[in-house]
Image (spheres, rainbow, N blue to C red):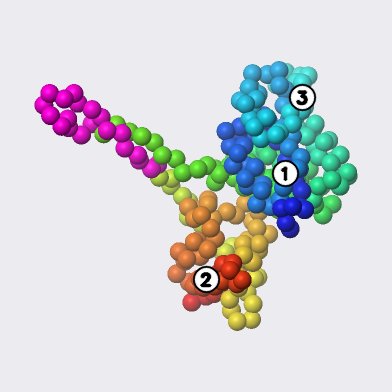
Amino acid sequence: MTETKFNIAVLIDGDNAQASLIKYMLEEVSIYGKATIRRIYGDWTSPHMNKWKDTLNRYSINPIQKFSYTTGKNSTDSSLIIDAMDILHSKSVDGFCIISSDSDYTGLAKRIREEGFFVMGIGMQKTPIAFVNSCEVFTFTENLLPVTEIRRDDSSVKPETASAPATKKKTKKTVKKDFPKFDVTNINKAFEISTIEDGGTYISKVGLALRKIDPSFDPRTYGFKTLTQLFESLDKYEVIRNDVNGLNHPLVKRK
């Protein structure tokens, strides 16, 4: 697939998505294609949707108004699903990205896949597994967060002279995240599926196999920027970096 031809409809559940991460969400979508349709659904008369208003024009997102006709309920999910089916049958895109952590879109994701279209999801790690596994690719928003740095006051810094007022020097401190340990079972399985005759395979092929086994698999979940870095941390595997036509296509094989 290429970015210029592979068009994706990005449909956002405004009640179940994080406005502060929209930039990173669209960057994630751009890995797989071009977001030609960008729509967000919600009741724009509600103060709850104010968080989105500053981002709509900046990221060229079309707001779709849906009123809450019953207290405690909204029509956002049904409206998004109806629009998705209209877009599906118009065949104006090659894939979909559903941005939500709501299990109500499980059936929609399955239906899109049945038609042979690419479907990805973006949501929080609390997203029900049924929705996650109904997508070909599912990215957790926790993996989209940039490296966070905070500033703290260092009170141990002394003034240069006795007459000078005491000042606090601001220093940067990187906030470290505790990453979970990953189960190598799926990694070993994906490697076996992808292995060629000489016992090695391209890491990119292993990545595709991993996504088929677990749509939510992402090396960033475990603190690695790429799958190559993850394999380099494993004792049982050896990574071989080689350039093909100026491009890096690393191989992996068992030691």
Q: Is residue 204 above or below residue 22?
A: below
Q: Is residue 42 left or right of residue 228?
A: right
Q: Secondary structure at mark 3?
A: strand
Q: Nearer the viewer, residue 61 or 76?
A: 61
Residue 36 in view, yes or no:
yes
Q: Nearer the viewer, residue 180 or 241?
A: 241
Could you classify mark 1 by the number of other residues whose Cα lies within 10 Å: few (under 14), some (14-19), or many (20 or more)? many
User: At 49% from the left edge and 72% from the top edge, which residue is drawn?
Assistant: 238
Could you classify mark 3 by the number of other residues whose Cα lies within 10 Å: few (under 14), some (14-19), or many (20 or more)? some
What residue does disc 2 label? 241
What residue does disc 3 label? 65
> What segment carries the magenta color?
155-175
| Discs 3, 2 touching: Cβ within 8 Å | no
**Residue 224: image x %, image y %?**
49, 55
Task: Give yes or no for residue 228 being in the magenta stretch.
Answer: no
For the residue marked with disc 1, what is the amino acid?
Ala
Q: Nearer the viewer, residue 183 or 113?
A: 113
For the residue marked with disc 2, what is the amino acid?
Arg
Q: Earlier in the sequence, mark 3 or mark 2?
A: 3
Q: Earlier in the sequence, mark 3 or mark 1?
A: 1
User: At 84% from the left edge and 52% from the top edge, which residue is drawn?
Assistant: 115
Is most of the magenta stretch helix, strand or loop?
loop
Q: Nearer the viewer, residue 44 or 247?
A: 247
- The disc placed on residue 35 is 1
Task: Give yes or no for residue 159 being in the magenta stretch.
Answer: yes
Residue 135 in view, yes or no:
no
- The disc placed on residue 218 is none
Q: Which quadrant would the N terminus be assigned to in this image?
A: bottom right
Q: Earlier in the sequence, mark 2 or mark 1?
A: 1
